[in-house]
Amino acid sequence: MAPGLPETVPTSAYSSPARSLGDTGITPLSPSHIVNDADPNVSEQQTFLVVVAIDFGTTSSGYAYSFTKEPECIHVMRRWEGGDPGVSNQKTPTTILLTPERKFHSFGYAARDFYHDLDPNEAKQWLYLEKFKMKLHTTGDLTMDTDLTAANGKKVKALEIFAYALQYFKEQALKELSDQAGSEFENSDVRWVITVPAIWKQPAKQFMRQAAYQ
């Protein structure tokens, strides 16, 4: 993901918030103390306007957000384009599609539907991946050079795929926030959080952090 993402939070419990880097990139993932209402410096620490939590799931993914002025009011992401008729699509499949040139094309329902509509011969040139998240947990020797295998059998760097996916969610969330507020939301306005399974070992968590920094 381009500069600017979050802290990682086990899905079974919250970890401490990350501190903001002073750049346009994602919030760093290094831990800091939890902001407390009684903290005299809380006004300095809460420079962000909204918290966005990305649930990067094995089968489906989504995000939710709350504004710091109304922390108890949780907004679930808007419905995704595409999907099954009559179904409230508050999550989208964890699928990603790259062009034959290995550039990001689409994610979720859009990726699934576009890929399935391709001519079979043309589809062989595209890189389609689904349910790739658990590769981080099941790979014993996980490194930043670990590969994933697309549907056409071609290899692609796992770090690249996760970075593309997180960048996609970042752009979607910022667009939704801006549309709802009627004014442009910047990355610096947001504290980002990524949930990770509690069973993940440290290498997998660090890998996800690195993908967020991309």
Image (cartoon, rainbow, N blue to C red):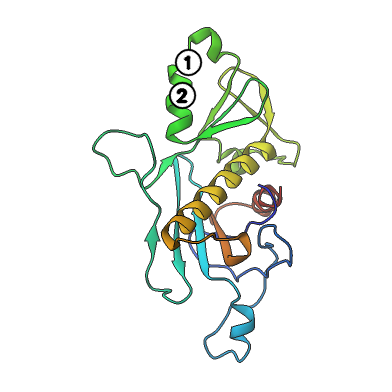
Q: Position of residue 58 (x, y in %)?
A: 48, 41
Whole-number angstrom distance, CA of label 1 to CA of label 2: 7 Å
Q: Nearer the viewer, residue 189 or 213?
A: 189
Q: Position of residue 180 (x, y in %)?
A: 42, 59
Res. 66 image quadrant? bottom left
Which mark is on residue 114? 2
Which mark is on residue 69? none
Which mark is on residue 118? 1
Residue at the front extreme? 182
Residue at horizontal 55%, vertical 40%?
134
Residue at horizontal 63%, vertical 79%?
45
Q: Are marks 1 and 2 in contact (CB under 8 Å)?
A: yes
* Above or below, 63 relative to 161: below
Residue at horizontal 59%, vertical 20%?
126
Q: Nearer the viewer, residue 116 or 146?
A: 116
Image position of 57 (left or right of 187): left
Image position of 31 (left or right of 78): right
User: Tag 2: Cα neighbours inside 10 Å, few (<14), some, or many (≥20)?
Assistant: some
